[in-house]
Image (spheres, grey):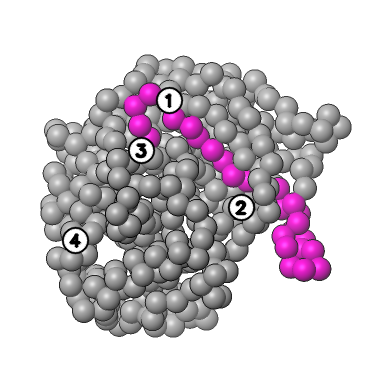
Amino acid sequence: MGKILRLMAVFLVATSFLKGPVMAQSSNIDHGYYAIIQTEGLAWALHVNDLFMRENGDRGYATSNGNIGLGLQPGKNQISLLFSPLTGEKSPDGDFLFELRDGVMISISIERRNFGTQDSFEINPIKLRYNAAEGAFVNEDKTTAGLDRVMAQPDMSSDGNFTITDLPPQSIVFDTGERIGGYRLDFDLVLNDDDLRPFHWSRDAVVMTDTPETRRGLMQAYQRLHDQIARGDGPAIFREARPIWDTTAYMLTSSSKNAEEFVENTELGLDRFQRTQPDGSELQPLSLIGPLESASIQFMAGGRLVRFRPDPIFWGLPPNGDENGTDSFPVVFYQNASGEWHIADVNTGL
């Protein structure tokens, strides 16, 4: 599956490495949570509390280890893996074919890491392998490293119970806009951690459904943001994204106390949000793959957050070898009871 290079990934990748021993003294959170995922034979998307975290389109053996702290809350959290055991074949009408078969494997561990000391510990809630003879996933006692699975650590635990349910066709939406069917694996993660912040949109966001009105309103929200970028209105963009960058500074950096410092400490800061990028790439017209009524749309948080995929706001880069790339602004929106649209997240999928 194709992959879109994301402009905001530069922000998060650069700042996530600021956590370290030399910056241990900080009012920001001093620890992070990571989902360590190993799979065989399936494509997947990881959600935390029904918020998209990241995805994998490689149906071979795949490993992934990324921070999930921005999706977590104190108490019980739902971790979900939306997965499709792809066969590598397509039906005559072009749909991706998937089938549960021997060898399909899912391993998920959760790690808590101290940014200052780099001390860490983990639990291992999920280690599953599909057995075709039994027609079910078998829960294994050992991790992929051959160690006994652990379910509880200080302030972090899981009972290891899980559910696997069928998903409707085209439920898993990837960054290319491709949609496939499959299954949903859910389990709980319990955290005793009052340092985690509530989501800034949680009080105001209303539940939406996929209607023509929702699609038109979402497109207008993208258009407003696109217009701000086209005219280089950095202050307007900052106001839109400030709650996200405040939380990102708190969760992923030790040196940035708020959104202002976060942006100032980031390469180029708001200067990236111009019609023409420093590398010569140009802001492209707002666009979707296909017409508005059938473009790939992704809902999260029980329908309270939404976005189009691929990202409609992007910059065209100069040719790089045999490939052309794009930088995109991967925003997610919510709507309040008054019908106003606001940015809920800048979701890089890292």
Examine the structure image and report whether residue 260 is included in the region drawn in magenta.
no
Label 4 – label 2 distance at C-alpha: 33 Å
For numbered disc 2, what is the local secondary structure? strand
Q: Which residues are magenta?
A: 72-98
Q: Which residue is located at x 86 percent, y 32 percent?
A: 133
Discs 1/3, front:
1
Residue at which label 4 appears? 238
Q: Viewer-proximal residue, 170 or 245?
A: 170
From the top left corner, tell me how far across and down residue 170 is, in percent.
64, 56
Q: Are marks 4 and 2 in contact (CB under 8 Å)?
A: no
Residue situated furthest right in the rendering = 133
Residue at which label 2 appears? 171
Discs 3/2, front:
2
Residue situated furthest front in the rendering = 338
For numbered disc 3, what is the local secondary structure? helix
Tell me: residue 334, above or below residue 158: below
Chain-order first, disc 4 or disc 2: 2
Chain-order first, disc 3 or disc 4: 3
For numbered disc 1, what is the local secondary structure? strand
Chain-order first, disc 1 or disc 3: 3
Residue type at mark 2: give it.
Answer: Ser
Q: Quadrant of residue 200?
A: top left
